[in-house]
Amino acid sequence: MSQPWVILTRRYGGDTRSPTVPQLSEAVAELYHEPLPGMTERDYAEHGAASLRYGYDDGPMYVLEVSRLREVALEEWADQDYGQELAPPRRMREVPEDLALRLWSGLADGQIDGVRSQPWE
């Protein structure tokens, strides 16, 4: 198996490879705190989520999406083309900001079993 890679896709666009914990924290804060001048509810809704992908060039890939509505979803894919789902998506609602950051940090560190063991719905 190849070396794992990690990519953070932020709420307003832009990918960061191998993000640091401060970069993950900043991306979560963008979702949980919306004090940007001139932004409307529609603007916030249009850019309503960010995701962290952890995977291998030859598969599998894990995607952990955090939304501005404090919802988190975990997806597992056979490869980075999203062609074959390995497990049904898992979801959590009303996720506190610190837990969202811990989940992203865990996934970024390759702690797949730790992320899976959370209280998903």
Image (spheres, rainbow, N blue to C red):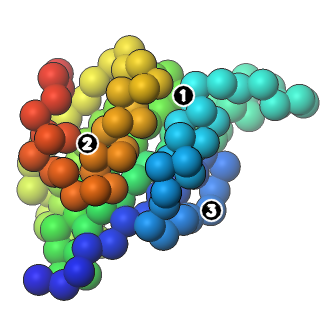
**Amino acid type, callout 1:** Arg
* Residue furthest to the top: 94
Real-space CA distance between mark 3 and mark 1, rounded to the nearest whole angstrom? 17 Å
**Residue 120 appearing in the image:** yes
- For numbered disc 1, what is the local secondary structure? loop
Ranked by sequence position, the earlier of labels 3 and 1 is: 3
Residue at image mark 3 = 14
Q: Residue at x 55, y 48 (%)?
A: 22
Expressed as whole percent of the image width and height from the top left, the position of residue 107 reads 28, 51
Residue position for label 1: 68
Residue plotted at (28% across, 24% down)? 92
The residue at which mark 2 appears reads as: 74
User: SS class of the residue under badge 2?
Assistant: strand
Estimate the x, y position of residue 17 in percent, counting from the top left.
Answer: 48, 69
Mark seen at residue 90: none
Q: Nearer the viewer, residue 34 or 20?
A: 20
Question: Along the polypeptide, which appears first: circle 1 or circle 2?
Answer: 1
Drawn side of residue 96 relative to residue 111, left or right: right
How far apart in space, not on screen, are marks 1 and 2 (Cα)? 15 Å
Give the quadrant of the N terminus: bottom left
Split into 4 quadrants, where in the image is the C terminus?
top left
